[in-house]
Image (cartoon, rainbow, N blue to C red):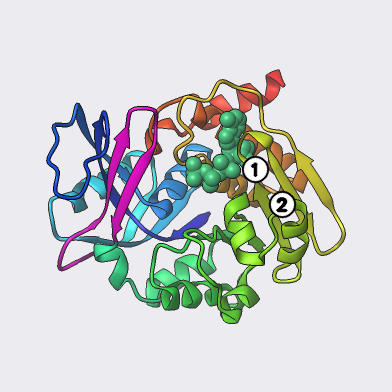
């Protein structure tokens, strides 16, 4: 089982010719509400890729809460650990301009009042093979979650997507087994622009690291000396939204199934390559049979 302690946001997406300037009102072409948030995205990606997944987080008592729960449940994610708190759910207000440029305002809402896991939630994490974390919840809560496996003497490995990029406290780094930044986050965390240099610097902080490089694939390193580069599967990308979340969710699935690092990278790259060929975030995430079929053909 995989547990995901993270954010759930309703993405409110307006499609426009050009984003409005301050003080301007414009007419948009289309509007969509799409369940998202890095936590919920990774949970849905892992469930579709074949794992039993428990989501731990919070939604508000507004109209978006039930929709977020339903999207997780529809993907087969266990939502017993999804709390309802008083106030609004997290939202991401997204303006997509023609040509694909986005501007995004995330208002954390319920995500902003999540506290460290206790009681049943801590037990769920302790029973897991992997715990997926991102940084869209309060840092104190993320640190507390990361510390659960060791405190419970559990085998759950702690996998952190360090997004959005913020400085990471030492207590968090001490509890992380594998960090999975994209190249921009890796540069922000280490001060090294070259991803290979950033990978080496990350291994001073945590035992294993994967740096994702978009269409250029991924770099992997571990403190025991392994270094790998897995090329991306060559596909025609139409929408790379949540490619990184799809990658992280699928990577956790392969690792909890016992795949070696090379095999786990290949599995996650295949899942991400399938997702970039379709529009949307959770809407684009592939099912296990699709990933297996793509891998058989490679
Ligand atoms: P996002 O923020 O859009 O979720 P990200 O910046 O976190 O993505 P990327 O490094 O862009 O993450 O992509 C993650 C992985 O997805 C890549 O390492 C690669 O395996 C796959 N991927 C991304 N873009 C492409 C592409 N154009 N073709 C094939 N695979 C891709």
Q: Position of 222 compared to 273: left or right?
A: right
Secondary structure mostly taken by the magenta-highlighted segment of the chain: strand
Q: Position of 127 compared to 157: left or right?
A: left
Marks 2 and 1 in Cβ contact (< 8 Å): yes
Whole-percent x, y for residue 22 in the image? 20, 50
| Outermost residue to the top | 297
The reply to whether residue 83 is in sight is no
Whole-percent x, y for residue 57 in the image? 34, 63
Instruction: State the CA–CA distance, disc 2 to disc 1.
Output: 8 Å
Q: Position of 132 compared to 25: left or right?
A: right
Q: Could you say which disc has been placed on residue 232 in the image?
A: none
| Other-residue count near label 1 (Cα within 10 Å), few / some / many at <14 / 14–19 / ≥20 | some
What segment carries the magenta color?
Answer: 84-107
Residue 82 versus residue 115: which sits nearer the camera? 115
What residue sits right under mark 2 in the picture? Answer: 195
Which residue is pictured at 68% across the width and 36% down the height?
A: 216
Asked whether mark 2 lies closer than 8 Å to ligand 1, one says no
Residue 294, by quadrant, is top right
Which residue is pictured at 70% across the width and 36% down the height?
A: 266
Residue 203 versus residue 96: which sits nearer the camera? 96
Rendered view: 65 above or below 201: above
Q: How many marks?
A: 2
């Amino acid at each position: 089982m995989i547990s995901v302690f993270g954010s759930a946001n309703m993405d409110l997406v307006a499609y426009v010719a050009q984003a409005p300037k301050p003080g301007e009102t414009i007419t948009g072409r289309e509007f969509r509400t799409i369940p998202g948030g890095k936590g919920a995205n990774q949970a849905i990606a892992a469930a579709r890729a074949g794992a039993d997944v428990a989501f731990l987080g919070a939604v508000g008592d507004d109209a978006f809460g039930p929709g977020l729960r339903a999207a997780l449940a529809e993907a087969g994610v266990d939502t017993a650990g999804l709390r309802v708190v008083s106030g609004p759910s997290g939202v991401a207000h997204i303006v997509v301009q023609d040509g694909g440029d986005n501007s995004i305002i995330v208002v954390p809402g319920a995500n902003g009042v999540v506290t460290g896991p206790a009681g049943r939630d801590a037990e769920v994490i302790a029973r897991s093979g992997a715990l997926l974390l991102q940084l869209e919840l309060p840092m104190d809560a993320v640190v507390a979650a990361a510390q659960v496996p060791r405190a419970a003497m559990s085998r759950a490995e702690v996998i952190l997507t360090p997004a959005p990029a913020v400085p990471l406290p030492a207590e968090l780094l001490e509890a992380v087994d594998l960090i999975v930044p994209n190249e921009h986050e890796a540069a922000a965390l280490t001060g090294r622009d070259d991803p290979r240099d950033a990978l080496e610097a990350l291994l001073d902080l945590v035992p294993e690291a994967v740096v994702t490089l978009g269409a250029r694939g991924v770099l992997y390193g571990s403190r025991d000396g392994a270094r790998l580069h897995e090329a991306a599967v060559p596909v025609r990308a139409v929408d790379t939204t949540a490619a990184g979340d799809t990658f992280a969710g699928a990577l956790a699935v392969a690792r909890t199934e016992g795949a070696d690092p090379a095999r786990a990278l290949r599995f996650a790259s295949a899942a991400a390559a399938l997702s970039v060929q379709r529009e949307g975030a959770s809407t684009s995430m592939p099912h296990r049979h699709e990933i297996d079929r793509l891998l058989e053909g490679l």
